[in-house]
Amino acid sequence: MRAWNFCAGPAAIPEEVLKEVQEELLEWNDAKSSVMEVSHRSDFFQEVASESKKDFIELLNIPENYDVLFLQGGATQQFAMIPLNFVKNGKANYLMTGTWSKKAIATASKYLEITIPISNEDNKFTSIPENFSEWSEFNLDADYSHYCANETIQGFSLRNFHKDYTHKLNMRTIPLLCDMSSSILCEPFEVADFDLIYAGAQKNIGPAGLTIIIIEKSLFSKINSNLPDIFNYEKHANANSMLNTPPTFAWYLSGKVFKWLKEKGGLTAMQKINEEKAKTLYQFIDQSSMYSNLVESNFRSIMNIPFLLKDPAFDGLFLENANKAGLLNLKGHRSVGGMRASIYNATPIEAVNDLIDFMDDFEKNNL
């Protein structure tokens, strides 16, 4: 029996998908070779690429005025590609709500003057004021605004900020860009509320090496024309994401995951499952005497749930016993400590229940 994988990324992939890939690995369909050996220019792979893109668009109900790119480089590369593409006034707004938005700011600041309307670094990224009057002002001359929807390390999430940006803040004239690497496909949202979304694949999509970009086509006219083609979003779009050799295996496997999601009922069904998993684990942590989660309840992630043991001296024993019990990759990020359970789409409720049973037994035996 396979163990439960709670890794933040590369993360769990649905077992049904892995078995299907295993069956096709040596000889894929009529290609008479492995999918990893097929040219990205071949009719075989062009069909895979087209169908994967189509399924992704259907899952997110992406409007026709957007394009979807399947690129190499990881989400971290987008920290640089975004300012390189869209620098005009030389200014941008960035929210700082965790490690990944902080890294994005550090990269963008090499090219732009950055305004940070809100930062929760002082309270260790656990909460922000919900009243926008307590925020600093956005720069109205900014080329764009950027935020991270779900901070994988801290388990801090802004699930509805895009609605606030459009309606409460009345900022729709400034393009809104979002890193959704660890939350995309976990629930439905309105793509039209954003101008650009990017996500590394290794959380809810597929293997590491692929990054998906959703971009409103009018942004192409704002791209810096002096960029080398390989850094230019429009050039990638014009080449159907094949300006250079794409990560073909990751693209193929991600397509399998999109089919799996559709079979499960799409993102509305996944949201119900994901919210139930998170609610179940948070409720156990909150009533426990040994474990705690520091993130304010309104901002808790439904994908990444960090938790601390009352006495850090038990961390090593906890992890050792968890591994023996088939509960893998629960160690928290080194910058935060403690534990972290990442419960992406491919992690079933059974895994969460097994984790809770283990945590309950561990608490009873060590308090």
Image (cartoon, rainbow, N blue to C red):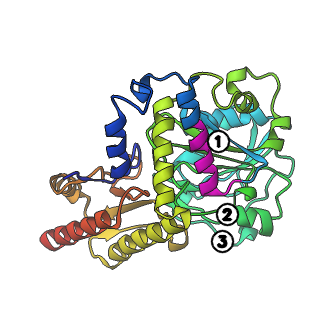
Closer to the chain start, of discs 3 and 2, is 3
Residue 160 or 103: which is nearer the viewer?
160
Judging by the rendered image, the residue that carries numbered circle 2 is 161
Nearer to us: label 3 or label 2: 2
Percent coordinates x, y for residue 195 in the rendering? 75, 49
Nearer to us: label 1 or label 3: 1
Judging by the rendered image, the residue that carries numbered circle 3 is 130
CA neighbours of label 2 inside 10 A, class few (<14), some (14 to 19), many (20+): some
Q: Residue at x 33, y 51 (%)?
A: 15
- Amino acid type at mark 2: Phe
Percent coordinates x, y for residue 13 in the rendering? 38, 48
Q: In this view, does 192 lie to the left or right of 290?
A: right
- Amino acid type at mark 3: Glu
Q: Which residue is drawn at 20% across and 54% down?
A: 326
The stretch of residues the image draws in magenta is 49-62
Dot label at residue 295: none
For the residues labelled 2 and 1, the Cα–Cα distance comes to 19 Å
Dot label at residue 213: 1
- Amino acid type at mark 1: Ile
